Image (spheres, grey):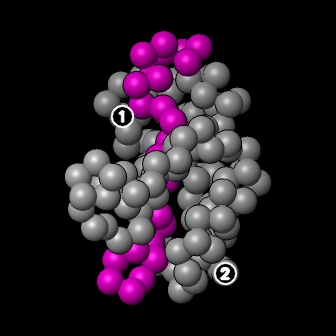
Amino acid sequence: MKYSYTKKLDINFDQVVTKTKEELTKEGFGVLTEIDVKKTMKTKLGLDYDNYIILGACNPEFADKALQIEKEIGLLLPCNVIIYEKDISVFVSVILPTVAMNIVQNSTLNSIAVTVEEKLKKVIDELGSL
């Protein structure tokens, strides 16, 4: 099952992180969490990782709508966006909310998931045009 939308980009990692945050803001998302996996793995386990960041993105308007419908939906929030290096390439990827929300099997939530997914895909597509 495909659960992400991913693009390979030809700009450096730090630029992708910055531009991703900017594009998320344009689509009404805030970044609630930022996890530096490379740093965490080094600190906690002494392991060397390539650059890898997890951004927890939230659009408050849509989060509110989803929470009004289904209180337990908070278990699936926020929407994760990952930026990572593999070999010499940089990738950015977002969760597909329609897939994640499908486990809840609530048709009212599905329309929200579709809208949020469109916005997240737009973020990634805008990055692809850099």
Q: Amino acid at mark 2?
A: Leu
Q: Foreground mark, 2 or 1?
A: 2
Residue at point 73% right, 44% down? Answer: 28
Q: Earlier in the sequence, mark 2 or mark 1?
A: 1
Residue at 68% over, 31% down:
60
Q: Which mark is residue 67?
A: none
- Which residues are the magenta region? 67-94
Q: Can residue 129 be seen in the rendering of this structure?
A: yes
Q: Which residue is mark 1?
A: 102
Q: Position of residue 74 (x, y in %)?
A: 47, 23
Report the residue that reaches farthest toward the right: 26
Q: Could you say whether the residue bearing mark 2 is in a helix, strand or loop?
A: loop
Q: Which residue is mark 2?
A: 130
Residue 124 placed where, x, y %? 57, 65
Can residue 6 be seen in this snapshot?
no
Q: Residue at x 48, y 32 (%)?
A: 77
| Element under disc 1 | helix
Identify whether 116 is placed above or below 14: above
Q: Residue 41: x percent and y percent?
A: 30, 55
Image quadrant in which the C terminus is located: bottom right
State the separation of the CA atoms marked 2 and 1: 32 Å
Label 1, residues with CA under 10 Å away: few <14, some 14-19, many ≥20: few
